[in-house]
Amino acid sequence: MAQSSAGQTLLKRSFRRKRLRENAAGLFFISPWLIGFLLLMFGPMVFSLGISFTEWNMVGSPKFIGLENYAHMFTSDPFYFKSMIVTFKYVFIMVPLQVVFAILIAVLLNRATYGIKFFRSIFYLPSLIQGVTLALIFSWMLNDDFGPVNYMLELVGLPRVHWLTDPNVALYALIFIALWGVGSPMVLYLSALRSVSSEYYEAADIDGAGPVRKFFNITIPLITPTILFNILTSLISAFQTIVLAFVLTGGGPANSTYFYSLHVYRNAFTHFKMGYASAMAWVMFILIVLLTGLVLASSKYWVHYEDDGGGR
Amino acid sequence: MSMSTSKNNSRNNSRNNSRNNSRNKRWFMLSLVAALCLSLLSACGGKSESGANSSGTAANGGNKGTEGNEVTLRFMTWDSGQTLQPYQNAINAFMEKNPGIKVKVESVPDNYDQKLLTSLASDTAPDVFMAWNYPLYVPGGALEDMQAWVDKDNYDLGKYYPILMDYMKYDGKLWGLPTTYSTRAIYYNKKLFDEAGVPYPQDGWKWDEFVDTVHKLTKPGQYGFIMTPDDVMTMQPYVWSNGGDMVSEDGKTVEGVLNSVENVETMTFLKQLYDASSKINSAGKFSTNNGLESFQTGQIAMFDNGMWPLGDILKEGKLDIGTVTHPLPEGGSLKGIIHTSGYSMPKSGKNKEAAWELIKFMSGEEGIKIITANKFAFSPVISVDEENGYAADPYLEAFAKELEGSDKLIASMRNEKWSEAEDMIRAGVQAIFYNNADIQSTLNDAAKQAQAVLK
């Protein structure tokens, strides 16, 4: 009895040492990122948290006002909830659409057809163009009077659409443009699809499953880890979206694309209310952490890791 | 029995392991998430710090500026390229006249206020800089009060237009000497008027005539005018000429001022103008200078702007244009809006003597004559403006007339929080233009919200 417990502690110790070594190796590998974070981001973050309790226009010294900035947000800023709603709308339409499109394209490109490599490159290519360049391209594509998109609509007898200038349309136009970047998640799905073992499909074939059944019962469950990753990253970047709206609509028309991030930017660099802008950024930060936490918590009900399925 | 317990154990272990795994995964994900979302926050902080650092080294490298030794001044402007050249010419003339002073020009076309504020906050501001938004810079206490320098030299401020000097003041003190100025007027494309058989507009025309003209010049692919709810600032000439205002003289009261009877009339006219003109325009992106392209390509017949694009339009010679003053309401008088800026220096400046010499030269007769050559801009010095004779120029006459009746400061010069109040008013105007909201009640609400900001 005593012997075995001594053996166990010995085993535990060596296990712990191994664990430590593994952790150290892990930390070493991510150290460039960690050091960058600590040196470049941690300081400004703490600073902005401090500033969020003050009134400060960059000149002179910040004036401490306690929680006033936070109170203003929820009680007397008429644009706060408006911009929040616009942002949520964007996120909850954009993210699911992106996931679905990325998977669909990946599935199509996962076939061994002639010239498939060419098509894979073609479908990935657009996502190399991002940010301001993308926005400028689409400002011409969607131009009311001489944009190719409206021209093509007219050719097939449809009315011109005021893509970026109609308050009821502009947000959807931005979502449409954002989906342009679907290539990057598509590549992830493609590699996930390719790592699904063909044995599953063979077994399913024997059991007489059709392609639809195979897709939903084998393919989708096995790529759920990639879906989770994609949802998390695009959720976060969608909440912070600013470039497209900044360049294309400036938040208009009639504030229909006035994202939360634009409201932060406007308060910081038009009204020079650094304290208020910092407070808003921190609320967004907390919100994003909560939402991603929620997604992660839900993941145990729908994400399948091949290795922990049956317990080794 | 023992078999089953060991099985149970191993199952427990594996469950623990998998839980640990997923916990690690979760922590990894969470920290990844944290890093990603904070990039938004730190982007702002990082940018301002690097800005301060780069200008910091430049300031330390500069000379301390004792008499006799050579002094290097840093001069910051938002002008760049072609619009910088006139200023550069004047600076070259200054350096020729003052061999002991070298001037290094720093051109910051983007995020000017941001750059200036960070450099002021970190005591690394340039020795002389252009400024237009005194209510924004003054409250921090980083600007040099120019009155002392004016008094020291008995510098004559009487040579400037009084209304321009009002733009150099905030809180009752003088913060700069004027650079150049421009009013705004309406440009029109003569060819489009001829095609439609509509007579050219004449100075002193009326609001109804304007709306009527816009109607006549609007057809598929062409608009008479672009009116947007977004540019609240340039609505002020209309508001003023009808006897209204957006905020009280002291910049403190909006309620009862913005939602006055006169302003309801003005807004009714602007709404008519909006309905007659391009219904939906390049929303949000049309501000002080946009619309120029549409005008140059003949898509719009008239557009409202300062004198800046005039030189280029005339030089290209493709458009046959005319200029006319803003239309007036019945019984109203012309009250133009002024764009101007000043030369200022920071309180913490190390070469103030030399900086003051540069400012005097640039804003005085000699410098201003160089800068305003070739119809680049109007001169704030009355005698130079007269000598240039731009008021008699067929294209510039309208702009000169706009100045004559101008006796009001734009609202943003009256209160440091105006840009935020303007957001509330803009939202109101948008509701009126886009959604046909009731004008009186919308202005009442906007006034209330704007008042809450300014209190």
Image (cartoon, rainbow, N blue to C red):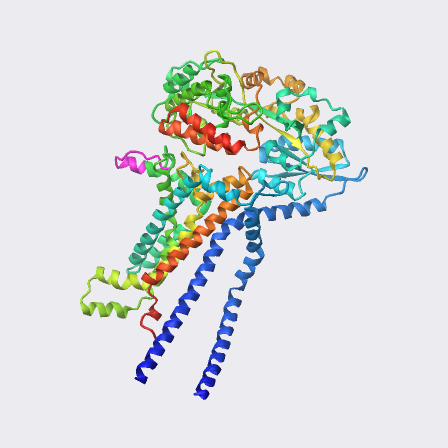
Residue B290 seen in this snapshot: no
Q: Is residue B447 above or below residue B32?
A: above
Q: State the residue at coordinates (71%, 28%).
A: B147
Q: Quadrant location of residue B106?
A: top right
Q: Position of residue B8 (x, y in %)?
A: 33, 78
Q: Quadrant location of residue B141?
A: top right
- Most extreme residue toward the top is B331
Residue B53 seen in this snapshot: yes
Q: Is residue B137 magenta?
A: no
Q: Is residue A305 above or below residue A119?
A: below
Q: Is residue A25 above or below residue B452?
A: below
- Say which of A105 and B26 sits in front: B26
- Most extreme residue toward the left is A208
Q: Position of residue A13 (x, y in %)?
A: 49, 79
- Say which of B218 and A214 sits in front: A214
Q: Quadrant of the C terminus of chain A?
A: bottom left
Name the chief secondary structure element in magenta: loop
Q: Is residue A161 magenta?
A: yes
Q: Quadrant of the N terminus of chain A?
A: bottom left
Count up the numbered dots. Answer: 0
Q: State the residue at coordinates (50%, 44%).
A: A70
Q: Is residue B361 left or right of residue B432?
A: right
Q: Is residue B156 above or below residue A200?
A: above
Q: Position of residue A217 (x, y in %)?
A: 25, 63
Q: Position of residue A62 (x, y in %)?
A: 61, 43
Q: Which residues are magenta?
A: A151-163
Q: State the residue at coordinates (26%, 69%).
A: A200
